[in-house]
Amino acid sequence: MPLIDHLKELRKRIVLVALGLVVGAVAGWLLYDPLLQALQQPLVAAEEMRGNEMTLNFAGPMAALDLKIKSALFLAVFLTCPWWLYQLWAFITPGLTTKEKRYAYIFVGAAIPLFLGGALMAWFVFPHAIQILSGFLPDDATGFTNAQEYLSLVMRLLIAFGLAFLSPVVLTGLNLTGVLPASSMAKGWRWAVLVAFTFAAVMTPTPDPWTMILVALPICLLYFVALGIAWLHDRRQEKKLADL
């Protein structure tokens, strides 16, 4: 496709993603109260375990409205993930062959559970992190948690983990389209492990190493799964060329 057509296609996909997020934000707005209750559960659990009072603090008259808008957009990212993941792949497909376009269904089918699975893992890690961090409170102290900072932390964790779990799908897609051979992935496995543990160390807000290891190991495993798929694909391609 000419450059101008690529830009038009990019604009089209961005508009479609934005429209999907608007629809998802409306649903997220209606689901705000259940979401806020769910987000407060780690604080409630920490309060019961430690005996310290843990409450969300709204720092101004506009804080509650701002928090509700952010929560709606946050939920929209997850509610519409099949839509924007498909738009991402659909932007790539005009430059691919008919056979390569068939991978779109596989891409979206694998990307959705991986993205949601990464977010779910972060959701299970987060209460553990809150319990560890609340342990630094002095006895009989009250923990006032800024609601906006608290939500921003949850959003960063869930979205970052969801995107991290998408990495094997991206790597496999690059291999299937001939951009990234399995040999290059095999040579770079040490860097992949280092990146996974660095990401886990940065994104887990706790000082204990076990949480970091718990987060990094699934990401490393997914990398090697992608490497295995790429290796099988390259072997198949080499065999076809040899038969010719």
Image (spheres, rainbow, N blue to C red):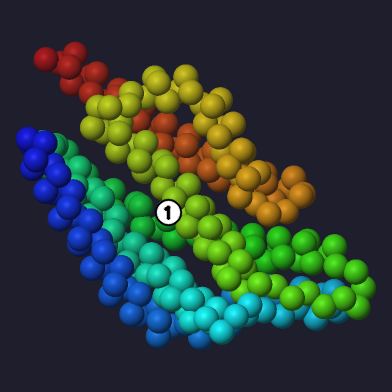
Quarter of the rendering containing residue 183: top left
Task: Using the rendered image of the protein, determine whether residue 99 is visible from the camera's viewpoint.
Answer: no
Toward the front, the furthest residue is 61
Q: Nearer the viewer, residue 22 or 64?
A: 64
Toward the right, the furthest residue is 139
- Residue at point 20%, 42% (across, down): 92
Q: What residue is pinned by disc 1?
A: 114
Q: Amino acid at mark 1?
A: Leu
Specify whether 224 is left or right of 174.
right
Q: Nearer the viewer, residue 179 or 230?
A: 179
How many marks are shown on the rendered structure?
A: 1
Local secondary structure at mark 1? helix
Residue 87 spot, x, y in % from top left: 23, 55
In the rendered image, the quadrant that contains the N terminus is top left
Relative height, residue 53 to residue 195 (above, below) = below
Task: Using the rendered image of the protein, determine whether residue 171 is visible from the camera's viewpoint.
Answer: yes
Relative height, residue 7 to residue 44 (above, below) = above
Specify whether 204 is left or right of 221.
right
